Image (cartoon, rainbow, N blue to C red):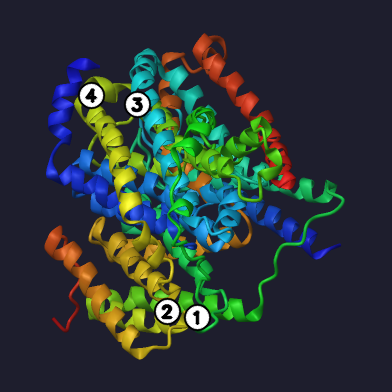
Amino acid sequence: MSRPKIRSLMEGGVIALIGGGIFFLIPSQVEKPIGVEGQIPPSFLPKVIAISLMLTGGGLLLQTLLRPKMPSPSRMLWGEWSRFLLAAGMLALYAYLFPRLGFVVSSAMIMGIFTHLFGARSWRKILLSIALVPAGVWFFFEILFAIPLPRGFLF
Amino acid sequence: MLEFLVPAAQLFFTFTNLLAVSAGLFIGIIIGAIPGLNVPMAVALLLPVTFYMDPVAGLSLLIGVYKGGTYGGSISAILINTPGAPAAAATVLDGYPLAQQGKAGKALRASIYGSVIGEFISDLILITVAAQIAYVALKFGPNEKFSLVFFALSTIAVISGENILKGLAAGLLGLFLKTMGLDPITSSSRFTLGIFELIGGIPFLPLLIGLFAVSEFLVQIEKKIVVGQRNQIVPLSKNYEDNYVTWREFRENIKNILRSTFIGLGIGALPGSGSAIAAFVSYGVAKNASKNPEKFGRGALEGVFAAETGNNAVCGGALIPLLTLGIPGDAITAIMMGVLLVHGLIPGPDLFVKSGDIVYAVFIGLIVGNILHLFIASLGLRLFIKLLSVSRAFLFSAVIVICLAGAYTGDSNVFDVHLMMVFGVLGYIMKKFEFPVAPLIMGYILEPLLETSLVQAFIVNNDSLLPVLTRPISLFFVLLTVFFIIRSFLPKKRLGKIESQN
């Protein structure tokens, strides 16, 4: 079986599994209301969605099996994966540091890393951007719109 | 209608609103011009700002971004052979060849005039028909509302792109995400996963910013960077005639412009059809109707006029279902619905009755916006061209900082920032596996309406849904649903034909 078909089968399988997972979790995750017999229960729409997802996943599987040939999707190279994983990790770090170091400090740090990751090499431009952008956004939200941003333990 | 005009004009004509429209257009043109940045991303990033503005200013800002962004894609399409927005994909076909012939300025001006005229006529028609449609929609009961929402959800099949089942899966996922939290009827908790912050459900802002902006950031960052790589921009000619559209050239294209406007308006009014479809259909029809079809694809000014008029005329059309029926026509109008809801304004026919002055103030904003669009696009052209050379490194890094601030400021809750990151990764995975993101947003937005109308229909019909099939208006929407599911196979073949001919 070709690689595109295997990938498409996996996609259908995952969708069906998500539907199945939702259906399985409904009894434990949906509270039963008291004293509202005869009305549509709160679990009705989630059940419909779960069953529809399972059917859609099944439809994707069937579609894959019935298609004689499938176009090859573009393959991700290891370099692209590593950049994505690094970026995702940096975003998680940003979310962690943001309330602790404050918006301006954490944004300046992370922006410096990302501009370098994107290929900027002029240190002057990088320093200028990490000084201006977080300060500008801070000014826009805190001063213009009076929406406070975290200051962290430093300020 | 007339009784609302004076209060609406008083409401709209303030410095803040005029500034909002102008700022929206300016930002939209820049966003549209730069490949990699897109209008849904810009609208998502500006949404938190609009929560702190009054509804007219907030909507004017977003509408400005929508119009400016749809036009802005033509700048990079003409100058660097890369459409800045999907809506400009047809503009490349003749815009770039014109630029190669030294007529980039002419192509850019044709794009401006086509865009503004298309928007203007489309907005006039919106203003004329909207009240009539809303008047009819006021008579809708729960059965009609349920079938209407069901029809809107079926158009997920139309906006899904290549694979209808993937679009359906994304839409169902959006429906599910909105069910998390408290049930709107009984207040029973659903899928809160033991997390206190999820009792209120998944908030709109982090979902939106994550799916549209953070995911795009991740897509861009995975691309290999060539240090020092810059866009090769075709320079403008020093010859006056090559930089402006003559009166004769404009007169020869009036029919083309009018035809493309009505194509764009009609396509925009259909839920799920976007600017890109309108641009290609307008281009194809213009080519078939042209006396010199062999010139298309080699620098025909008609091609640029047709594509740009068609894609911008969609904007007015897309607002028709949103304002009159409360059904967003595409992802961008789905986001605009958020602005209305935050200010306690429920889009739909009741809006014309309860808040007619606001609706007509927005309409005035649309017309004024078109005039401002002409001036901003013409006067700022050289600046926008210069901005094409700004490095992606600084642009996207700035975007992620704005994303975080935007997600946080919704509820001043760090949990929202974490949610934004999760949805950013989800959006990235969806894009890599070719699952469209827009249906997820549509499902999320329409779920409350679907669920409440379903429960109301059950109560009104004594625990039956049969009246949905027997009442004439709801039966009409059911038949329309069936039609759209079948139609969803057809336009792709036609579009494929138009594209392959070029």
Could you confirm whether marks 3 and 1 are on the same chain? no
Q: Nearer the viewer, mark 4 or mark 1?
A: 4
Q: Amino acid at mark 4?
A: Gly
Please check whether the numbered discs 1 and 2 fall on a single chain. yes
Quick check: B387 left or right of A132? right
Q: State the residue in front, B425 or B313.
A: B313
Measured as percent of width and height from the top left, residue A27 is found at 50, 46
Task: Please give the label number shown on residue B356.
Answer: 4
Which residue: 50% across, 35% down? A44
Q: For the residues marked 3 and 1, what is the alpha-carbon distance in whole angstroms?
A: 45 Å
Q: Quadrant of the N terminus of chain A?
A: bottom right
Q: Are marks 4 and 3 on the same chain?
A: yes
Q: Identify the image quadrant of the C terminus of chain A.
A: bottom left
Query: Which label belongs to residue B348?
Result: 3
Neighbour tally class for label 1: few under 14, some 14-19, many 20 plus, Cα within 10 Å = some
Q: Is the Cβ of the residue at disc 1 closer than 8 Å to that at disc 2? A: yes
| Callouts 2 and 3 in the same chain | no
Secondary element under disc 3, as helix, strand or loop, is loop
Q: Nearer the viewer, mark 4 or mark 3?
A: 4
User: Residue A86: which numbered mark, if any?
Assistant: 1
Query: Is A22 drawn above or below residue A136 in the view shown?
Result: above
Q: Position of residue B18 (x, y in %)?
A: 19, 43
Residue type at tag 2: Met
Mark 2–mark 3 Cα distance, whole angstroms, equals 42 Å
Q: Quadrant of residue B322?
A: top left
